[in-house]
Amino acid sequence: MQQQDLRSPRGAKKARRRVGRGDSSGYGSFSGRGVKGQNSRSGGGVRPYFEGGQLPLSQKLPFIRGFTNIFRVEYNVVNVEKLAQFAANSEISPEVLRNTGILRTLNKPVKILGRGEIDIPLNVTAHKFSASARQKIEAAGGSVRETG
C-alpha cells in the first residue's frame, strides 16, 4: 500500500448540500426553504430566544441581586492534612506543592486552611494562612511565612 492508495472510509466525507441547482437535485426552485413566510426570506427568521411573542423565559426570571466585588481574590486552597505527607522539617512553598501534584497551577495565590491534623514540624511559605492553620503548624513545631 502506498500513500496515494489511502482513502477515507465510506460515508466519512458527506457532500455539502448544493441548493438552487435545478428541480431534479431535490433542492431546486425554493432551495429547501419552503414557500413564502418569514423564514424563506433572505435575512429572515426570528432572533435567538424569541418565543413567538410570549414573555421570554429570560425576562420571567428574577434579576441576580447584589454586585461583583472587583477586589475579590480567589485562592488555591490547601488544607493542613495535605501537608502531613511531607518529611519533618521540610521547606514547603507553592512551587513544592505544584511539583508534588497537590496544586495543579500557580495562577492563583495559595492559602493554607486548617482542616485535618498535623504532628510534624514544617516550614511553610504561602500567600495567606487561616488562623487555625497557622496555630496547628506552629503547635507542631513548624514555622509559617506569609508572602502576602
Image (spheres, helix red, strand yellow):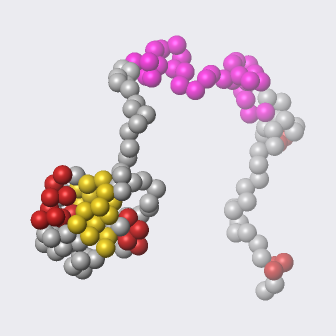
Quarter of the figure with residue 6: bottom right
Of residue 145 and residue 126, the one placed in the foreground of this image is: 145
| Left or right of residue 105: residue 34 | right
What span is colored magenta in the figure? 31-60
The number of callouts visible is: 0
Does the segment drawn in magenta span residue 38? Answer: yes
Q: What's the magenta bit mostly, secondary-structure-wise?
A: loop
| Left or right of residue 134: residue 58 | right
Picture residue at 19% right of the left edge, 69% below the top: 142
Q: Is residue 123 above or below residue 133?
A: below
Q: Is residue 134 above or below residue 64?
A: below
Q: Is residue 105 above or below residue 100?
A: above
Picture residue at 33% right of the left edge, 60% below the top: 126
* Residue 17 percent location from the top left of the image: 77, 45
Quarter of the figure with residue 47: top right
Does the segment drawn in magenta span residue 64? Answer: no
| Left or right of residue 139: residue 92 | right
Q: Is residue 81 visible?
A: no
| Residue located farthest toward the right when viewing the structure as drawn | 22
Of residue 66 and residue 29, the one placed in the foreground of this image is: 66
* Residue 5 percent location from the top left of the image: 81, 79
| Left or right of residue 137: residue 9 | right
Quarter of the figure with residue 103: bottom left
Picture residue at 32% right of the left edge, 70% below the top: 92
Q: Is residue 130 visible?
A: yes
Position of the N terminus by quadrant: bottom right
Q: Is residue 75 above or below residue 100?
A: above
Picture residue at 72% right of the left edge, 27% below the top: 34
* Residue 125 percent location from the top left of the image: 32, 64
